Image (cartoon, grey):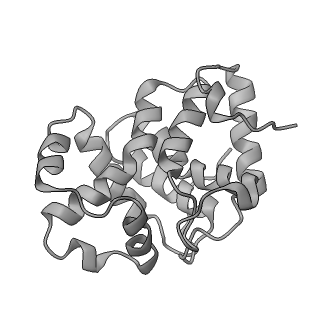
């Protein structure tokens, strides 16, 4: 049976087969549930994001990160009332929790960092693109208030120099686009 790995054991790594089993079990438990405030399930959102990433040319690690970018939300569902929430829109710090969990399962530092940092792109785009905030879904606007709001100009300048900047921004665009009801995409297997 799947056993939740605490964030404190993030440095522990498991076999690739055990990691795949844990991820499949997480999607079995929570993948069919509503994707926070949107008209797709958690699994549909993840698969659509991965399919978009697969067409990007940014590599397998970007595809894996896109597939698993919101795993922290599902992990928070295992914690029930103990998980700190963003109103009715998911789990606080889901990005960091997901990145740490994936690192503990033996995923590369790049995959873990892309998951752990994907929220930064929304904060960046709200700072630098006029009108971006207005185009966010209602759920994304709510979560932004819990995630620190738009970056400051100084934060945005530093973020833009990051080696992962291009991929993190791409992940945000996949995240936004991966909310299409009944879209046909490859299955999880």
Using the image as rendered, state which of residue 8 and residue 138 is in the foreground. Answer: 8
Direction right: furthest residue: 1
In the image, residue 1 above or below residue 184: above
Q: Quadrant of residue 81?
A: bottom right
Question: In the image, is 8 to the left or to the right of 56?
Answer: right
Total numbered circles: 0
Question: In the image, is 161 to the left or to the right of 71?
Answer: left
Q: Position of residue 92 (x, y in %)?
A: 53, 57
Q: Position of residue 2 (x, y in %)?
A: 82, 38
In the image, residue 135 above or below residue 176: below
Residue 63 seen in the figure: no
Using the image as rendered, state which of residue 134 and residue 53 is in the foreground. Answer: 134
Residue depicted at 31% across the width and 59% down the height:
122
In the image, residue 182 above or below residue 173: below
Using the image as rendered, state which of residue 187 and residue 83 is in the foreground. Answer: 83
Residue 183 seen in the figure: yes
In the image, residue 56 above or below residue 91: above
Using the image as rendered, state which of residue 171 and residue 113 is in the foreground. Answer: 113
Q: Which quadrant of the figure contains the N terminus? A: top right
Q: Which quadrant of the figure contains the C terminus? A: top right
Residue depicted at 18% across the width and 76% down the height:
131
Residue depicted at 32% across the width and 38% down the height:
58
Residue depicted at 78% across the width and 55% down the height:
29
Q: Position of residue 145 (x, y in %)?
A: 38, 68
């Amino acid at each position: 049976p799947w056993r939740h790995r605490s964030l404190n054991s993030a440095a522990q790594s498991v076999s690739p087969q055990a990691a795949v089993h844990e991820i499949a079990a997480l999607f079995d438990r929570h993948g069919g549930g509503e994707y926070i405030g949107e008209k797709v399930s958690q699994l549909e959102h993840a698969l659509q994001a991965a399919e978009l990433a697969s067409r990007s040319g940014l590599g397998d690690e970007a595809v894996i990160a896109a597939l698993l970018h919101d795993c922290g939300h599902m992990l928070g569902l295992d914690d029930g009332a103990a998980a700190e929430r963003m109103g009715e829109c998911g789990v606080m710090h889901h990005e960091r929790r997901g990145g740490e969990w994936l690192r503990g399962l033996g995923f590369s530092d790049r995959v873990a960092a892309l998951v752990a940092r994907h929220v930064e792109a929304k904060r960046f785009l709200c700072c630098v693109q006029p009108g971006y905030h207005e185009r966010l879904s209602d759920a994304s606007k709510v979560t932004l208030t819990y995630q620190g709001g738009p970056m400051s100009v100084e934060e945005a300048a530093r973020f833009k120099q990051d080696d992962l900047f291009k991929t993190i921004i791409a992940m945000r665009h996949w995240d936004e686009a991966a909310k299409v009801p009944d879209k046909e995409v490859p299955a999880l297997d």
